[in-house]
Image: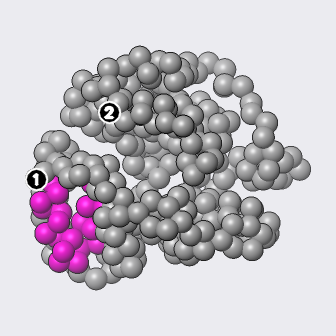
Amino acid sequence: MINARINTVSGLLVGLVFLVAPYSLFAAEYEQGREAYLAANYDEAVRIWRTLAENGDARAQFSLGQMYLEGLGIEQNDAASTRWFKLAAKRGLASAQFNLGNAYKHGRGVRQDDLAAAAWWRRAAEQELAPAQFNLAMLYTHGRGVPEDHNKARYWYGRAAANGHAEAKQVLAALETGQRSEAVGTASLGPTPEGIDLRREDWILAQDSLHYTVQVIASHLESSLTSALSQYDFGEPLAYFRFSRQGEPWYAAVYGVFGTHAAAQAAVDRLPLGLRKNSPWIRQFGAVQALIRSP
């Protein structure tokens, strides 16, 4: 069991908007797909969502893109995932716009393009999606895909912080005290927060590759990740690992050991809202272990 002390933690995708097909037209069918997904009946979820996606339902397009991204109920395919994200993004779905920005930033299923990443993150940011606002601020900080502009960076950090983004709050606090954080160019790392039992790669590599865990947060800042984790009391084993994304170091934390996907989903459902709203990712340890071992 986890007891939340605050409800903010940086993460991924929330928010669904429909601008083409009326939500009520597909709501019941979409929920059938969601129920199949929660029951780990991925083939059925893909079948239902594909039909809706082909009929223009943005939420189903996004969900189908996620299934392709994770390889659930269908063969993993970055290009197909990005194609569905793009359809949903063009219909105004902020979460799809955010994922599409990620695809362009990291060259997953499309050619790497910082300009396109900035454009799609901006669309999601304007819909008040905090992770997109934070990513856009980072681009302005480093001048990637947009001109370097620290005033605009501070503006977007501020909007992300106002929407509960933990890393954005930390960056703003550092700026306000005149300190330079890692997000604006330094490389110093703080110690693991006192009182939190964080395990590392050796523990993850020792787990059964067929068992499941829940990825609760990922960050390019090790200190931000450990700080965010310290805001919660975790009763299950908690570990984090370093991996490389487009040649840059990233860090991700996983929570718990579960024998089945259904058990992992039940654990996700028990997470505090601050974690659940950022789309925790159920993963088999084998996939995480492969990521750790990759150069």
The front one of 7 and 71 is: 71
What residue sits 69% from the left and 73% below the top?
A: 146
Give the vertical position of 23 relative to 42 (above or below): below
Amino acid type of the residue that numbered disc 2 sits on in the rendered structure: Gln
Contact flag, marks 2 and 1 (Cβ < 8 Å): no
> Residue 53 colored magenta?
yes
Magenta segment boundaries in residue numbering: 45-67
Residue 253 located left or right of residue 25: right
Give the vertical position of 3 relative to 174 (above or below): above
Residue 38 located left or right of residue 272: left
Give the vertical position of 258 relative to 44 (above or below): above
Residue 214 seen by the camera = no
What residue sits 71% from the left and 46% below the top?
A: 170
Q: Position of residue 253 (x, y in %)?
A: 50, 34
Q: Give the labeled residue for mark 1.
A: 44
Q: Position of residue 199 (x, y in %)?
A: 53, 20
